[in-house]
């Protein structure tokens, strides 16, 4: 299912710049978290520790 998202995506750059070096976040980690933010998700569930930490830093509830 594709969901059209018409939003400012400048936060992608800021997630990348702020977290790639410190967390070792990869492009797909950032894309997944940014997608959750763009869709206004409150919770982010993943088995990937890097994604979980990135989601937490981005303000998502990531148990």
Image (cartoon, rainbow, N blue to C red):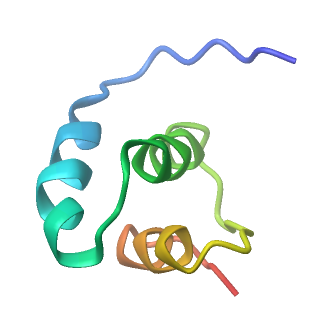
Please identify the quarter of the rendering in which residue 34 is found. top left
Residue lying at 61% horizontally and 78% vertically, measured from the top left: 61
Residue lying at 64% horizontally and 12% vertically, measured from the top left: 4
Please identify the quarter of the rendering in which residue 9 is found. top left
Q: Is residue 23 left or right of residue 3?
A: left
Location of the C terminus (image quadrant): bottom right
Location of the N terminus (image quadrant): top right
Which residue occupies the extreme bottom position in the image?
Answer: 63
* Residue 10: x %, y % from top left: 21, 32
Residue lying at 73% horizontally and 18% vertically, measured from the top left: 3
Q: Is residue 5 left or right of residue 25?
A: right
Residue lying at 22% horizontally and 50% vertically, measured from the top left: 16
* Residue 7: x %, y % from top left: 40, 22
Above or below residue 33? Residue 51 is: below
Above or below residue 27? Residue 18 is: below
Which residue occupies the extreme right position in the image?
Answer: 1
* Residue 12: x %, y % from top left: 29, 39
Please identify the quarter of the rendering in which residue 59 is found. bottom left
């Amino acid at each position: 299912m594709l969901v059209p998202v018409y939003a400012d995506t400048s936060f992608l750059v800021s997630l990348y710049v702020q977290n790639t070096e410190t967390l070792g976040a990869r492009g797909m980690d950032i894309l997944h978290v940014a997608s959750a933010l763009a869709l206004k998700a409150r919770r982010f569930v993943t088995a990937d520790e890097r994604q979980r930490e990135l989601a937490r830093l981005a303000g998502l509830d990531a148990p």
